[in-house]
């Protein structure tokens, strides 16, 4: 337990020097054990300074993704957290755990994905060190067609947390992309297992990927005109842990009442597409121009087509026409 106890003590005294002798006395271990635990924490990425005659100090600017760090900022302590450095896909692995009977409220958080997935079968660029990738599994008493409400809850949770930590304005592109300064900084993928007999969900997995900063070498060429970063250059202490905790806290709260008008209004006021000229993109079909008239309470879009007819979009994808971007 020396590592965990030492880390907890460091966080309680962040940015303050503590002598090795005092640490050993407080933890009731040898100074060699303290030295070993400090080395382990440094190997994990924590920035710990040591100065002869003064001791050790943990710099609060350390941005290490860990369960301990997330729980320091998490209000919903009932959530189960699994934090890993690298994973294939948080959604993919969590689906396996859900199928094996994992309880509702299990969150899987990673600093890198090697096979990240987006909507419509796309891959999701998930490099190490500059992004946050998390999935939350719930077992709600909801019908499958209502899952879009949980996606909207996730979009609001991500948008509000990014705004709180960055001070920047976010917009939501229907139904699940978060944009800052016109560029995508967060994508959401919601997947569910459905009981075919009653149409109710066995479980739902809500996955989010957030671009915090520019990756080394920049984004791949195909993303350079699309992708952006949620945060600017300045260092924010414990950024990934605070971001994960903020998103999970809000999502856990909103998911209990996904039809709450307050969530709908928070989504609507950030909508990128209301009143805009769009192109409706459907698999296997030609792009269709339209205008968004309204966002309905079930999160479908009321649109008017070029021939004057109107209709609702309940699924698919849209793009905002370049001359109308806002």
Image: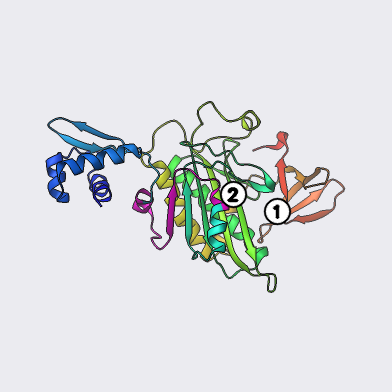
Q: Which residue range is magenta in the image?
A: 68-92
Query: Considering the numbered disc 1 on the image, is that residue within a helix, a strand or a loop?
Result: strand
Residue at the (67%, 37%) spot, across then down: 325
Q: Is residue 223 above or below residue 298?
A: above
* Residue 55 circle label: none
Query: Considering the numbered disc 2 on the image, is that residue within a helix, a strand or a loop?
Result: strand
How far is disc 1 from disc 2 in space, using C-alphas?
22 Å
Residue of label 1? 294
The outermost residue toward the top is 217
Q: Is residue 102 above or below residue 2?
A: below
Q: Is residue 91 magenta?
A: yes
Residue at the (58%, 61%) spot, across then down: 204
Q: Find residue 193 and report its horizontal and vertical position in percent.
A: 63, 63
Whichever of callouts 1 and 2 sits on the residue coming sooner in the sequence is 2
Q: Find residue 186 and report its horizontal and vertical position in percent.
A: 56, 43
Residue 61 makes an appearance in the image: no
The outermost residue toward the right is 307
CB contact under 8 Å: marks 1 and 2: no
Q: Find residue 13 and report its horizontal and vertical position in percent.
A: 22, 44
* Residue 188 circle label: 2
Q: Is residue 54 magenta?
A: no
Q: Find residue 102 and report its horizontal and vertical position in percent.
A: 50, 64
User: In which quadrant will I find the C terminus?
Assistant: top right
Q: Which image quadrant is residue 240 in? A: top left
Residue at the (67%, 43%) spot, across then down: 122
């Amino acid at each position: 337990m020396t590592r965990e106890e030492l880390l907890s003590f460091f966080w309680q005294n962040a940015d303050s020097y503590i002598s090795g002798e005092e640490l050993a006395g407080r933890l009731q271990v040898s100074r060699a054990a303290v030295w070993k635990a400090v080395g382990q924490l440094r190997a994990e990425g924590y920035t710990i300074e040591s100065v002869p005659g003064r001791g050790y100090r943990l710099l609060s600017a350390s941005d290490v993704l860990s369960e301990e760090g997330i729980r320091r900022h998490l209000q919903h302590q009932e959530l189960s957290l699994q934090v890993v450095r690298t994973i294939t896909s948080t959604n993919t692995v969590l689906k396996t755990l859900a199928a094996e009977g994992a309880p509702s409220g299990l969150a899987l958080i990673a600093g890198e994905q090697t096979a990240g997935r987006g909507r419509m079968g796309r891959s999701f660029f998930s490099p190490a060190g500059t992004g946050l990738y998390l999935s939350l599994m719930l077992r709600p008493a909801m019908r499958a067609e209502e899952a879009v409400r949980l996606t909207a809850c996730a979009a609001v949770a991500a948008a509000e947390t990014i705004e709180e930590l960055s001070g920047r304005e976010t917009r939501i592109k229907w139904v699940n992309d978060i944009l800052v300064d016109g560029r995508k900084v967060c994508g959401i993928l919601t997947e569910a297992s459905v009981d075919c007999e009653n149409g109710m969900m066995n479980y739902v997995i809500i996955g989010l990927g957030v671009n915090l900063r520019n990756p080394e070498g920049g984004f791949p060429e195909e993303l350079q005109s699309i992708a952006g970063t949620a945060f600017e250059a300045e260092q924010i202490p414990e950024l990934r842990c605070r971001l994960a905790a903020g998103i999970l806290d809000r999502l856990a709260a909103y998911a209990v009442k996904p039809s709450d008008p307050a969530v709908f209004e928070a989504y609507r006021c950030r909508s990128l597409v209301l009143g805009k000229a769009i192109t409706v993109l459907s698999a296997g079909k030609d792009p269709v121009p339209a205008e968004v008239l309204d966002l309905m309470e079930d999160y479908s879009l009321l649109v008017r087509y070029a021939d004057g007819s109107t209709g609702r979009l309940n699924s698919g994808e849209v793009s905002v026409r370049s001359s109308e971007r806002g």
